[in-house]
Image (cartoon, grey):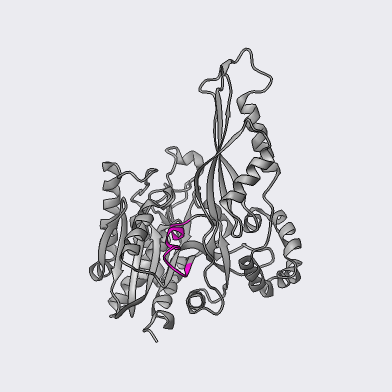
Amino acid sequence: MRRKKASSAAEAHPAGLAAAQHLQTLVRIPTVAPPGDAPLPPEVAEIFARHRAAMEECYPRVFAAASVETVGRAGLLLRLPGTVADRPVMLMAHQDVVPVPQDWEAEGWEFPPFDGTIADGHVHGRGTLDDKGALVVLLDALESLLEGGWSPARDVYLLFGADEEQHGPSAVAAVAALEERGIEPWLVLDEGGAVALEAFPGLKGPAAVIGASEKGIVTVELVVESLGGHASTPPRESAPGILGGALVAVEGSPFPSSLHDLSVEMFEGIAPHLRGPLKPLLRRARSLRGPLASVLPRLGPELAAMVRTTAAITMLEGSPAQNVLATRAKATLNCRVAVGSSVEDTVTHLVAVIGDERVSVEVIEASEPSPVSPTEGDERWDALVDAVAASYPDAVAVPYVMMAASDARHVARIAPAVYRFSPLLMDKKQREAIHGPNEKVSIDSLGRGVEFYRALLTGPALGPAA
C-alpha cells in the first residue's frame, strides 16, 4: 500500500477548517452499530457514549440551548425551542457508520479509516461522507449562529440516528415519540442527494440533486433445498446450480424502466445546462418518456437506477465443506423499488423471471417507496434551492428520487415534506467510495456545507410565521 503523507490545508474555506477538525474528532470514534434493535452491547454503548461526549464538547452552545433525549439504542433527539412552536423544522443526520474490514490495507485504503487524517485538502476516513460530514456541517452552522446571538423563529428538532445503516430502529423510536406528542414537522431534511459532479453526461458543472422521494427497499432470499450427500456422486442438478440459474435469470431480466414525474422534472431542469446529444432529448423528457426510459439504462448504473427497480445479489450460502453437497443454497437480493412501483410488483417480477418452483422467494424485510414531497413553487423547496444558491452558486438544483434508503423514510408518515440532501460536493469517485475504501470529503466542501445550513436556517421560509 502506498500511504500518502498527511498534511494540513494551508488555504481552505475558513468555516471548513473548523469543521474539518470536528469531523476528524468524530471519525476517530468508530460508531458501528450491530444489526437488530436489541440494546447495544456494553462495549458498543460505550463507543456511542464517547461519540455523544465528543459532540457535546465540540458544540457546547447547541447542547446547552437544546433539550436532549436518547431515542432507541443511542439515537439523539434535540429540540431547540423557537419563538413559536408551529411549523417545526426537523434536520437529520446519523452517527453510525458501516464497518471496515480488519485487513483494511488490503482493501486499498490510503489512510487508516478511523484516523480522520487531514491531507491534500480533504478529511479522510469512514463516515466523512456517510454521514458524519453532514452531521458536522449542520452542527457547526448552528453553533456559529448561536454564538452570534441567533435564536430560531420556530422549533428546530435535530434527529441523529445511531443505527441508520441497520434499518434505523432509533429513528423509528423517535418518530413514534413525536407522533405521540402530536408533532408534525413542517419541513424535514436528511441525508441523501449531494452536490454531484459527473452525475449527468454532458453536464460540466455540479448538480445539487435533492431527494424529494426515495425508493422502497425489499430484502429477498432465494432458497433451494436438496438432499445433499457426498461430493463424489453429484446429482445432475444441485441446489447451488439451480440457484445459480435463478440468479442468472434475475440479472438477465431487468425490471421494466419508466420515467416518473419527478425524474421528468429533474431532466427538464438539467437540460438547459447540458452539452451534447442528451440536451434536446431531456428538454422534451415529458413527451419522450418511453424512449428515454429505454436509453438511460445503457448510459451507466446511476442513470439506470433512476428509471427502474433494481435487484443486487449481495450474499450467497451453500455447502459447509468442500466435499459435501449442499442441502440448502441461499442467495440474498437487495432490491430498491422504484417510485410508482411497489413491493408486490417487485416480488411478482422476481417469481416470473425465475420461473422455477424449486426456488422459493422469501421476503425478509420490505418498505414501500416514500411519498413524493412538493417541489417547484413550494416555499420549503424554494428554501432549499435558495440555500444551495448561497453555498454553491454554480450548482443546478433539481429534484430526484433517492436510490438508497435513509432514516427519512420513517419520518415521511408524520411529515408532509421530507427531503434528502447532503450539502457536500462529491465527484463520481467519492460517491463510489461511500461504503467502500478511501471515503473522503474536501475541506472547502465542509465550509460550503456550513454556509448551506446557515442560509437555510436564517432564510425567510424558516422565519416568523406570516
Asked if residue 17 can be seen in this view, the reply is: no
Q: How many marks?
A: 0
| Picture quarter with the C terminus | bottom left
Asked if residue 28 can be seen in this view, the reply is: yes
- Above or below, 99 against 385 in this view is above
Q: Quadrant of residue 285?
A: bottom right
Relative depth, front residue between 179 and 15:
179
Q: Quadrant of residue 460?
A: bottom left
Q: Position of residue 321 (x, y in %)?
A: 52, 20
- Above or below, 107 against 320 in this view is below
Q: Position of residue 58 (x, y in %)?
A: 29, 63
At a point 43% along the width and 50% down the height, the residue shown is: 167
Q: Position of residue 36 (x, y in %)?
A: 38, 44
Relative depth, front residue between 134 and 154:
154
At a point 29% along the width and 41% down the height, the residue shown is: 41
At a point 39% along the width and 67% down the height, the residue shown is: 91
Instruction: Classify residue 253 as left or right of residue 33.
Output: right
Relative depth, front residue between 188 and 7:
188
Q: Is residue 37 magenta?
A: no
The residue furthest left is 64
> What predominant SS class does the magenta segment belong to?
loop
Q: Which residues are magenta?
A: 406-418
Q: Quadrant of residue 133?
A: bottom left
Instruction: Classify residue 189 as left or right of residue 156.
Output: right
Q: Position of residue 101 (x, y in %)?
A: 44, 40
Q: Is residue 409 magenta?
A: yes
